[in-house]
Amino acid sequence: MKRAFAIVFSALAALQVSAAEPQGVVLFLGDGMGISTVTAGRILAGQLAGSTGEEHELSFEQFEHVALVKTYNLDRQVPDSAGTMTAIVTGRKANFGAISVAGSTPRGSCIEALQSPLPTLLERAEAEGFSTGVVSTARITHATPAATYAHVSERDWESDADMPEAVRLEGCRDIARQLVEFDVGDGPDVILGGGRRNFLPVERHDPEYPGKTGKRNDGRDLAKEWWEAADGRQYIWNQAQFNALQPGPNQVLGLFEPSHMQYEADRERDAGGEPSLADMTRFALHSLLARGQPFFLVVEAGRIDHGHHAGNAYRALHDVIALDAAVAIARDILDAERSLIVVTADHSHTLTIAGYPERGNSILGKTGLGDFQYPTLGYANGPGYRQTETFETLKDVDTEDEGFKQLAAVPMPSETHAGEDVAAYARGVGAHLVRGVMEQNELYDALYMGLFGAPRR
Ligand SMILES: [Zn+2]
């Protein structure tokens, strides 16, 4: 009896110790996931699940703490991903196109950028001996993921081939090189995304698409350099290798496409196969937890933005649903008392939900009066612009087709970002700091609190 009591008691004590141990912070970025995109994504998710859709709840819509976030860049009313992600991961607003360098740095300058890096939360975590991860369906060198580990005044400098010779001679390094040469702590521990071409020399054929080559002019194979730089590192590039890999404490680099990974809607058709955002999130979380230190993980649904730029709500919204599934994985794996999950967007897009469609009308369908039917979803600008006289022909157009481009009011080859506030949703340690109407860089305070359990220094 006494012995049984002792066992119960020690089990309780163990439970209390583990209850205090922080797990980590996950920042989910829906690139371009403005509020209308969340609403439309929610309705589509509900409709795909067989309901009318409007009443559906996405995983992160169940989080208690919500804020509106002002997204402007220091120099632009309507921002881009570089300046906005810099604000979130460094706590300082930045300029359009700038990646984790101070606002005093002119775009495209080298010397000034070398003198004005803004430390990122990922670097602070690595410096503390914590674990870190970066996951994105975009190129891992694209603006949003890059802002976590690189410092560069021009977001387009993803490989050395993208840089003017003058800035290379001044000592500035491309973004892929900055990832592989990252020298704080032991570097990011889980890196999963697209963008293989920026890591391979131009002389090298791509393993998945033999007709394509790497992009680098300096002859370096950065993927190989990365896995040779430390024991136990593993590099993978396709679904079979991903499936064969057990999540554990070893560091992993996965580059699943030469450029961006596929849209969720196209993923099944990929030649080499690709893991979903949810699969990558699950893998990253189990790997980071296996390392036994608090972690900072960034997960970007990078192609919501690209679907919108293409005027194609179908692909943008299916990528919102992929993000929803990834957040649900994190919500289920992590303990709310010992972790923080923040879900937000870097900026909005010009998507609108218009007309008076009836409850349960397909969100990708049409609304209107009699013969005058138009798509419920539209954009303020973009490639879906049509002359007014062709509106009648919409009667015969399947607006639910995956390739349909929603109507746009102003003709533009690429639909633009939008400048209204985005939402942030939070659960866990520090989530109470996500509230009211916030400046985007204030999200950093919540992430910092979640990671270090104390106010930002
Ligand atoms: Zn964009």
Image: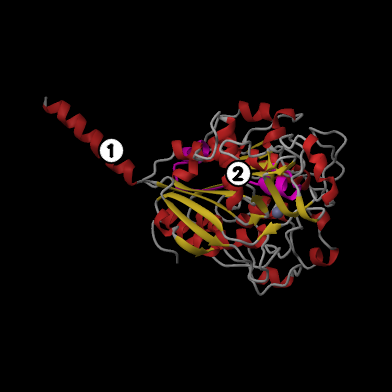
Residue at (79%, 48%) from the top-left corner?
384
Range of the magenta residues? 284-313
- Mark seen at residue 76: none
Query: From where the camera sits, is residue 228 visible?
Result: no
Count of numbered tags: 2
- Residue 361: where, in percent of width, then height? 61, 36
Q: Residue beneath label 1, please?
A: 14
362 up-or-down from 215: above or below: above
- Residue 308: where, in percent of width, then height? 71, 48
49 up-or-down from 352: above or below: above
Q: Closest to the observer: 223 or 327?
A: 327
Q: Closest to the observer: 453 or 348?
A: 348
- Report the quarter where the N terminus lies: top left
Residue at (84%, 45%) from the top-left corner?
390
- Residue 414: where, in percent of width, then height? 78, 53
331 up-or-down from 439: above or below: above
The crowd level at tag 1 (other Cα within 10 Å; few <14, some 14-19, many 20+) is: few
- Mark seen at residue 40: 2
**Residue type pointed to by label 2:** Ala
**Residue type pointed to by label 1:** Ala
